[in-house]
Image (cartoon, rainbow, N blue to C red):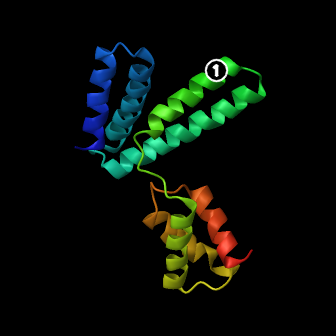
């Protein structure tokens, strides 16, 4: 089952269960996907949809931190709840040990020896690990491994 079909099924389930919060969150995501499909005039793959979900999660988390700083606990909770629903559609993220292991392999593969080679490593790593680790985490671990 594709990610898009999964979202449509979950939308139906949320409607049946009268879960308006989940329904509205999925609808918002579906409209974002539809907008990109209309703009690009093509059917999106699961990988493309995952990128949209990651972007949406990041936006929710950034908004939530702003609300927390502003003392708006109610809006903070709403954004974090939406982010949790969206995260459930993302592939399982790699653990720290797994990520480090994969990055060590990539560093060996590209022949990186110092921080000067970080660009080569990041280019390969972000492609290979798309969806299972976010760029910020990859960058932190690469810097640690190359000995910043």
Counting the numbered discs, the total is 1
Does 7 sit above or below residue 3? above
Name the spot of residue 59 as percent of width and height, x first: 58, 37
Is 101 situated above or below 60? Answer: below
- The secondary element bearing badge 1 is classed as helix
Residue drawn at x 61%, y 24% is 77
Q: Is residue 109 left or right of residue 42?
A: right
Seen from the viewer's position, the closer of residues 139 and 14 is 14
Q: Position of residue 6 (x, y in %)?
A: 28, 36
Q: Quadrant of residue 104?
A: bottom right
Of the pair 82 and 34, the residue shown nearer to us: 82
For image coordinates 37% across by 49% down, the residue present is 48
Q: Position of residue 132 (x, y in %)?
A: 46, 56
Q: Residue at x 30, y 42 (%)?
A: 3
- Left or right: where 74 falls relative to 37: right
Quarter of the image where the C terminus is located: bottom right
Q: Residue lying furthest top in this view?
A: 18
Residue shown at 63% from the left, 74% from the top: 118
The residue identified by callout 1 is 75
């Amino acid at each position: 089952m594709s990610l898009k079909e999964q979202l449509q099924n979950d939308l139906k389930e949320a409607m049946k269960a009268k879960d308006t919060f989940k329904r509205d969150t999925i609808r918002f995501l579906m409209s974002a996907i539809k907008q990109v499909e209309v703009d690009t005039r093509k059917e999106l793959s699961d990988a493309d949809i995952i990128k949209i979900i990651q972007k949406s999660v990041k936006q929710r988390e950034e908004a939530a931190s702003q609300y927390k700083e502003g003392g708006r606990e109610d809006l903070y909770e709403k954004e974090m709840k939406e982010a949790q629903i969206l995260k459930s559609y993302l592939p399982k993220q790699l653990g720290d040990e797994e990520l480090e292991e994969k990055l060590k392999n990539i560093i060996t593969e590209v022949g990186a020896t110092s921080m000067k080679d970080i660009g080569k490593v990041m280019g390969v790593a972000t492609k290979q690990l798309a969806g299972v680790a976010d760029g910020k985490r990859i960058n932190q671990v690469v810097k640690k491994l190359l000995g910043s």
